[in-house]
Amino acid sequence: MQNSAGPVPRAVVTLEGLRRLIPLLERRGYQVAGPTVRDGAIVYETLKKLEDLPAGWTDEQEAGRYRLKQREDAALFGYNVGPQSWKKFLHPSTIELIHIERNGEGVRVLNQSSPPPHYAFLGVRACELAAIRVQDRVLLEDRFADPVYASRRRGVFMVAVQCTRAAPTCFCASMQCGPRARQDFDLALTEIADKGRHLFVVEAGSAAGAEILREMDPREASPALCQEADEAVERAAVQTRQMDTAGIRDLLYQNFEHPRWDHVAARCLTCANCTMVCPTCFCTVVEDVSDVTGSHAERWRRWDSCFTQAFSYIHGGSVRPSVKSRYRQWMTHKLASWIDQFGSSGCVGCGRCITWCPAGIDITEEVRAIRGGSATSSRAL
Amino acid sequence: MNSNGRKKPKIAVFKFASCDGCQLSLLDAEDELLAVAGVVEIAYFPEASRSMAKGPYDVGLVEGSITTHHDAERIQQVRRQCHKLVTIGACATAGGIQALRNSRDIDEFIRVVYATPQYISTLKLSTPIAEHVPVDFELRGCPINKAQLIELISATLAGRKPNIPTYSVCMECKRRANVCIAVAEGIACLGPVTQAGCGAICPSFNRGCYGCYGPMESPNTASLVEQFRILGQSDPQIARAFRGFNAWAWQFRKASEECERHE
């Protein structure tokens, strides 16, 4: 996607202009999904109107802890990533693959699945665009493409939002995945909500994005405003959590027997929450079920996790029976063997696995400990 | 005879010390029960029918724990009559809520509760079926999930492995797109150490998991206890959390006993 067709590469749009975005997308046949407040967190769901966005909300995140807080302004995007990611839509947690009926002597395979909606994602952060790129590589660009992902991923309209704050769990800067979204979006918004202003500096990343932008009553963004927006994103690059990724592949390959694995195994619950919330974890299990009469069978695909025993079950038992071996497998794959397998790290630095671990395990701290640095518990009380 | 001309497998349902809730789950499976009755012979099921066909049975479903000398002998007979023996529910699999007595003085309970204690003949412990006889499959839950029961019966008839996961409740919770109540609200939840199967009912309604399905495959109770303390739970509270329907399951028992010692 290139800035070729847009009349204004950087425009400024008011809140009223932004209000037109969801109807404009819906008129073009998109189902708009984005952040909204539900059950004490900011989650991704179908949006019908601008008011569905979490206006005036923010989040507080630490290892094993998340709280919603009211902001002093009415910013629509004044928070960081929550418990869900866009894989909820692109790589659904539970999906029926085939449906089989006995038909006399033979069987009939029914494909009941209706075509997925054309999605427009509103509020995609830089780390999330990076995560989608990672899943594209795994699920589309290998020898075999996953048809479920492909049908959902095709033609997604991406509205990125530039982060102007970083949660204490964010480390996208270390992973070189953010905070600025530079590619793979149709529109990118930087929100400025202060001093009685509520504006959005908008960058079109595609012809389709530019076309939509033209209908949002854009004005030309002054150089001063553009600079202000850029500086706000720069501030989000100052992150307290960091991961030193220098030579990380060899570091982990050389430390299969490091005592830190026992240390983390004492805390790890093998509950699989980290893999469920990770925007790049893609593993699934396929289960066949039949009814009591044997006349009807279904094949379901569900999110799986390398933290379960069944995941590595082969004849004779599970290859990774210990907690230690399972955590080591996850982290070593994510940060090291992913590079050999797919050409990039499997981690984008979103920090979800840190926040949503019920035991507050911090992947950046684990790397630091294996590197031999100081490792103090950062668990917030 | 079923449509394949094969003799229908005979199923029997036995009750020991229990509330009958798990048997009711079978009766509650209205949509599937007729189909079940079509492919198996429900030969012995006193809760549902007066006709009681004699054994042997192909599959015996056992509800309840062993709490009396009489039942300790009866389970031996049941085992001899059943080709496959499946326990259903927390009582049969872990001793049930009545296993709370296991950590106390049974004689004192009898003196306090019963007007004429001498009529009471009971064992000191409430124990799971597997402590008495070999068990082929244990279906967890208090009560069991009827969908899991139907799945177990269907898989057994089809000769395939049942899809009964042993991982944590968290997997089901996250697949349902629930927001984690432990992380987002600081609610003490047993989900990370509890086996899936219920569909994460309680967390879906903003309650911490009560552990009805017992310990998951690799429960790190010591780590969860530490997290409960961070959430402000006292050791007596944590001990009580592990003393639910699966109090006698050894991993939960160990966690509660350690919290009690710590008090």
Image: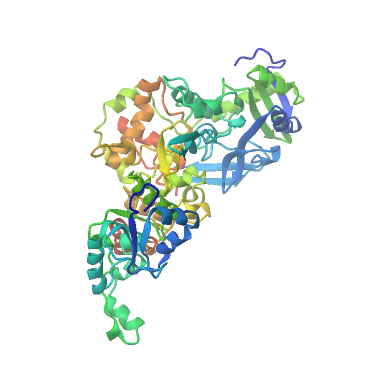
Give the vertical position of B152 relative to B62 (above or below): above
Give the vertical position of B236 relative to A280 (above or below): below
For this orientation, the residue located farthest to the top is A4
Of A179 and B68, nearer the camera is B68
- Asked where in the image residue A282 lies, by quadrant, the reply is top left
Of B55 and B31, nearer the camera is B55
**Residue B19 as seen in the image, left or right of residue A350:** left
**Could you say where residue A239 lies in the image, as x and y percent from the top left?**
49, 31
Q: Residue at left 54%, top 33%? A: A86
Give the vertical position of B177 relative to A370 (above or below): below
Q: Describe the colour scheme in one phrase.
A: rainbow
- Quadrant where the N terminus of chain A lies? top right
* Residue A94 can be seen, yes or no: yes
Q: Residue at left 64%, top 28%? A: A190
**Could you say where residue B56 lies in the image, as x and y percent from the top left?**
26, 61
**Could you say where residue B18 lies in the image, as x and y percent from the top left?**
36, 68
Of B200 and B108, nearer the camera is B200
* Residue B189 can be seen, yes or no: no
**Could you say where residue A254 lies in the image, as x and y percent from the top left?**
26, 26
**Residue A328 as seen in the image, left or right of residue A61:** left
**Residue A160 as seen in the image, left or right of residue B55:** right
> How many marks can you see?
0
Give the vertical position of A254 relative to B229 (above or below): above
